[in-house]
C-alpha cells in the first residue's frame, strides 16, 4: 500500500501536479463557500466560461495566459455589473448573456488558432494538470496566497455581506466594493484552477466541496475548513486514480468530489436522504 502511494512521487510531473491539485482543492473550496452560501453558482459558471477569450488572446500575443484569463474575467464581471445596474435585466440573466457571449468568442478564437497553427488547445477547456511546469506551480501558489490572505483579512466583512447584504449596507460597509472584490477573487481562483481541471470543470471544484461540507456542518468557517479538506482529498485521490488507471486527471478529480457529495447527500446526520427516511420510519 505504501509503495503504491510513493511510486508516483518519483516522477517530477506527478510532484508538480500534486502540488497544483492541493492548492486548487484548497482555494476552490474556500472561495466557493461564499458562492454556495449566496446561491451564486451561476456567477462562478459565468466567470469560468468568460476567461476563455482571454486565454486565447494571451496565447496569440505570446503573453502569460494567467494574466489574459484574469483580464477577461474582470471584463466579464464589469459587463455583468453594467447590465445589472444600467438596465432592468436581472443579475442571473446578465450572467447568462455575458458568459455565453464570452464563451462563444473564446471557442471561435481557439478554433481559429488551432486551424492556423495546427496545435491542440483543448487543455484550456478540460485541463492538463500532468503538463504543469515549475512556472505554473509558482503562479498558482502566488494566486492562492493572495486570495487566501484577502479572504482572511476581510472574513468578517464578507461574512456580514454574505448573509445580510442589506444589513451590511445599512451598517456602512461598501457592499458594491465587497461584491466586486468577491468577483475578482472568483476570477483569480478560476485562473489558478485552469491547468488542473480547465474552464468547463472548474465549477465543480468551486461548488461541490462547499456543498458537501454544508450538508455536514452549520457555520461558514466550518464549511470553509471542511470544504478545503474535502477539496484537497478529492484532488489528491483524483490524481492517484488518474495515474494508476490512465484516466484524464481533471474529470477524475471532479468524479471523486462528486462521489463524496453523493455520500453526504445520502448519509448526512442532519440532511441525509436515507437518514431522513429512517427517522420517518421510526416515527411511524
Image (cartoon, helix red, strand yellow):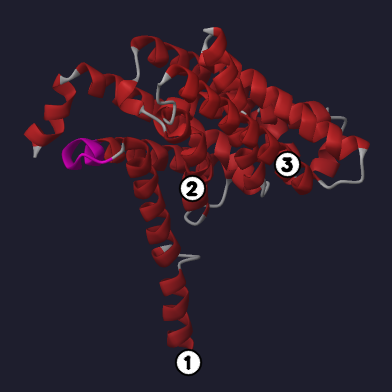
The residue shown at (41%, 52%) is 258
Q: CA distance from mark 3 to mark 1?
A: 46 Å
- Residue 173 visible? The answer is yes
Q: Nearer the viewer, residue 76 or 19?
A: 76
**Outermost residue, top direction?**
62
Q: Within the magenta stretch, is there residue 157?
A: no
Query: Mark 3 or mark 2, which has the lower sequence index?
Result: 3
Classify mark 2: residues with Cα within 10 Å, few (<14), some (14-19) or many (20+): many
- Residue 178 visible? The answer is no
Query: Mark 1 or mark 2, which has the lower sequence index?
Result: 2
Asked where in the image residue 242 lies, by quadrant, the reply is: top left
The residue shown at (37%, 35%) is 232
Residue mark closest to the camera, 3 vs 1: 3
Residue 229, percent from left and from top: 39, 39
Residue mark closest to the camera, 3 vs 2: 3
Q: CA distance from mark 3 to mark 2?
A: 20 Å
Most common secondary structure along the magenta stretch:
helix
Q: Secondary structure at mark 2?
A: helix
Residue 13, percent from left and from top: 25, 20
Which residue, given by chain and number where applicable, does mark 1 sit on? 284
The residue shown at (85%, 36%) is 83
Q: Which residues are magenta?
A: 240-247
Which residue, given by chain and number where applicable, does mark 2 sit on? 208
The residue shown at (10%, 35%) is 4
Residue 1, percent from left and from top: 8, 40
Which residue, given by chain and number where applicable, does mark 3 sit on? 95
Query: Mark 3 or mark 1, which has the lower sequence index?
Result: 3
Q: Within the magenta stretch, is there residue 244?
A: yes
Amino acid at each position: 500500500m505504501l509503495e503504491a502511494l510513493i511510486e508516483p512521487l518519483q516522477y517530477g510531473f506527478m510532484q508538480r501536479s500534486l502540488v497544483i491539485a492541493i492548492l486548487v482543492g484548497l482555494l476552490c473550496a474556500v472561495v466557493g463557500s461564499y458562492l454556495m452560501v449566496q446561491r451564486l453558482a451561476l456567477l462562478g459558471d459565468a466567470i469560468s466560461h468568460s476567461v476563455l477569450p482571454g486565454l486565447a488572446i494571451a496565447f496569440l500575443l505570446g503573453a502569460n495566459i494567467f494574466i489574459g484569463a484574469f483580464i477577461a474575467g474582470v471584463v466579464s464581471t464589469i459587463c455583468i455589473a453594467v447590465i445589472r445596474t444600467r438596465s432592468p435585466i436581472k443579475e442571473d440573466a446578465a450572467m447568462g448573456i455575458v458568459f455565453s457571449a464570452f464563451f462563444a468568442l473564446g471557442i471561435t478564437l481557439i478554433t481559429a488558432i488551432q486551424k492556423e497553427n495546427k496545435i491542440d488547445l483543448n487543455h484550456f477547456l478540460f485541463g492538463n494538470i500532468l503538463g504543469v511546469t515549475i512556472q505554473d506551480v509558482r503562479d498558482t501558489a502566488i494566486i492562492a496566497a493572495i486570495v487566501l490572505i484577502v479572504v482572511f483579512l476581510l472574513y468578517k466583512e464578507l461574512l456580514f455581506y454574505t448573509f445580510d447584504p442589506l444589513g451590511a449596507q445599512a451598517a456602512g460597509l461598501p457592499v458594491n466594493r465587497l461584491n466586486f472584490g468577491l468577483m475578482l477573487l472568483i476570477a483569480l481562483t478560476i485562473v489558478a484552477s485552469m491547468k488542473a481541471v480547465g474552464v468547463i470543470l472548474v465549477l465543480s471544484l468551486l461548488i461541490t466541496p462547499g456543498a458537501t461540507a454544508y450538508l455536514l456542518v452549520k457555520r461558514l468557517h466550518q464549511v470553509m475548513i471542511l470544504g478545503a479538506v474535502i477539496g484537497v482529498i478529492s484532488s489528491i485521490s483524483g490524481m492517484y486514480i488518474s495515474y494508476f488507471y490512465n484516466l484524464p486527471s481533471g474529470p477524475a478529480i471532479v468524479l471523486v468530489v462528486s462521489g463524496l457529495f453523493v455520500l453526504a447527500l445520502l448519509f448526512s446526520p442532519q440532511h441525509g436522504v436515507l437518514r431522513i427516511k429512517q427517522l420517518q420510519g421510526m416515527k411511524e
